[in-house]
Amino acid sequence: MLGSLFSFAATRFAGDTVDVLARRAVWGGLAAILLLTGFVFGLMILFWVYEPQYGAVTVAAAIAGACFLAALIALAVPAVTEWAKRRRAKNASSANPVAQTVAAVSEETEAAVDYFGAVQVVASAFMFGLGAARQIRRR
């Protein structure tokens, strides 16, 4: 009976999650297409406005260069934010050894949950605690 309850809850959760994710994917894809279309038309307008003043090749090169620079910045943003997060964590934890230990344990726990899954980590921690309690009781 308990297994049926868990099976029902898991099926219901999975079905709802798939529906929500599918809906978000469709609307997100549509939004991305519309944003890209707007960006392309904006670049065309920019070209048409500046082409008579500077020439077609110069304006096209400037727009291409600006797009290339924006792409490089967009590629660098995740690395810069990770660097800033590590730097902030290092500065915050270097002053307090307890905070440093807590941060290390938290990081290792997150890595274990990401690799093994939450249920397996909780089950392993429970079994480890049970074994430790038996050892304490024997002494």
Image: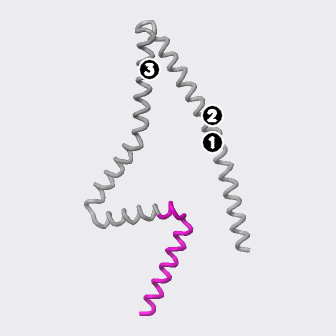
Q: Position of residue 55 (x, y in %)?
A: 43, 8
The disc placed on residue 92 is none
The foreground one among 59 and 133 is 59
- The magenta region covers 112-139
Q: Residue at x 42, y 28 (%)?
A: 68
The disc placed on residue 30 is 2
Q: Label 3 belongs to which residue?
A: 63
Q: Label 1 belongs to which residue?
A: 25
Real-space Cα separation, disc 2 to disc 1, in angstroms? 8 Å
Q: Do the residues under discs 1 and 3 have CB atoms within 8 angstroms?
A: no
- Hey, which quadrant is residue 137 in on the image? bottom left
Side (left or right) of 119 relative to 95: right
Above or below, 139 against 53 in this view is below
Q: Position of residue 53 (x, y in %)?
A: 41, 7
Q: Is residue 58 magenta?
A: no
The earlier-in-sequence mark between 1 and 3 is 1
Disc 2 versus disc 3: nearer the observer: 3
Q: Mark 1 is on which residue type? A: Ala
Q: Secondary structure at mark 3?
A: helix
Label 1, residues with CA under 10 Å away: few <14, some 14-19, many ≥20: few
Q: Residue at x 39, y 44 (%)?
A: 79
The earlier-in-sequence mark between 2 and 1 is 1
Q: Mark 3 is on which residue type? A: Ile
Q: Position of residue 113 (x, y in %)?
A: 50, 63
Real-space Cα separation, disc 1 to disc 3, in angstroms? 31 Å
Q: Do the residues under discs 2 and 3 have CB atoms within 8 angstroms?
A: no
Residue at the far left: name it.
95
Q: What is the quadrant of the C terminus in the image?
A: bottom left
Real-space Cα separation, disc 2 to disc 3, in angstroms? 25 Å
The foreground one among 75 and 96 is 75
